[in-house]
Image: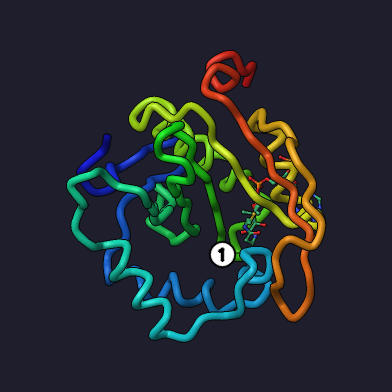
Amino acid sequence: MWQGREPELLTDRLKLRAFRMADLPDLHAIDSDPAVTYFRGIEPMTQEESEAWVRRAQKGTPKAGRKHFSWCIRRRQDDAFVGFTLLRSTRLEYQEWEVGYCLAQAQWGQGYATEATRGTLEFAYRQLSAHRVVANVYPQNEPSLKLLRKLGFREEARQLETYFEHGEWQDNVQYALLSREWEQRAD
Ligand SMILES: CC(C)(COP(=O)(O)OP(=O)(O)OC[C@H]1O[C@@H](n2cnc3c(N)ncnc32)[C@H](O)[C@@H]1OP(=O)(O)O)[C@@H](O)C(=O)NCCC(=O)NCCS
């Protein structure tokens, strides 16, 4: 059970840390970009919605332990904003968590999402003792599917028309990775 705020996580090129209100302009720039929000299954957010999101992320820790984590990703070299990663408890009693990731368009295609997600998973398995981590992806989100496969995730389910988002029914692909698969991975 983890009771504190998000710890700082360092990877080769990136620093992941808890969100601060000073991150709001950078966060809102991606929250209001339809190319970024589409595959999150949401519409572009207002400034107020982004601000409320940061406030929720900063809220105190419940005694039962944290069920949501969000990390602001910044480049170590120049502190440039890269995006964020998330962990959300899906089945607490079975140590299952869902991972999420989202990058500013300017930072796509450089391997940052894979690197930041790897750091986030390291925290999930080592510090939260996650048994399973799952990810839910639109089938047409090729970069996200590729990232998950690169990290060792397996496709477990293809659910047809399971969310009504963007005015139509959307399919979902669920991926999962067990802690023992993470420990045995080759990368
Ligand atoms: C998903 C996302 C984080 C991936 O970011 P990224 O910068 O492309 O990720 P990475 O560079 O770490 O790796 C992604 C892989 O997909 C590849 N890729 C990128 N764009 C692609 C495309 N249009 N088609 C196929 N492959 C693509 C990259 O080349 C890379 O593979 P490689 O390492 O073999 O070269 C980014 O696209 C994003 O923020 N999208 C919007 C939010 C989102 O979809 N979040 C996930 C919801 S499930």
What x and y, as percent, mark residue 139?
80, 53
Answer above or below: position of 98 versus 106.
above
8 or 93: nearer the viewer = 93
Label 1 secondary element? loop
What residue type is disc 1 on? Ala
**Seen in the image, is 141 located left or right of residue 100?**
right
Residue 70: which quarter of the image? bottom left
**Seen in the image, is 45 located left or right of residue 6?**
right
Q: Residue furthest top?
A: 184
Residue at figure coordinates x 32%, y 60% from the top left: 19
The residue that label 1 is drawn on is 104
Q: Residue furthest front?
A: 93
Answer above or below: position of 81 versus 61.
below
Residue at figure coordinates x 52%, y 35% from the top left: 118
Residue at figure coordinates x 49%, y 58% from the top left: 82
**Seen in the image, is 3 located left or right of residue 37?**
left
What x and y, as percent, mark residue 168?
78, 76
- In this rendering, the count of numbered labels is 1
127 or 15: nearer the viewer = 127
* Residue count near mark 1 (Cα–Cα under 10 Å), binned few <14, some 14–19, many ≥20: some
Answer above or below: position of 132 versus 75.
above
**Quarter of the figure that contains the C terminus:** top right
Q: Specify whether tag 1 is near ligand 1 (CB below 8 Å).
A: yes
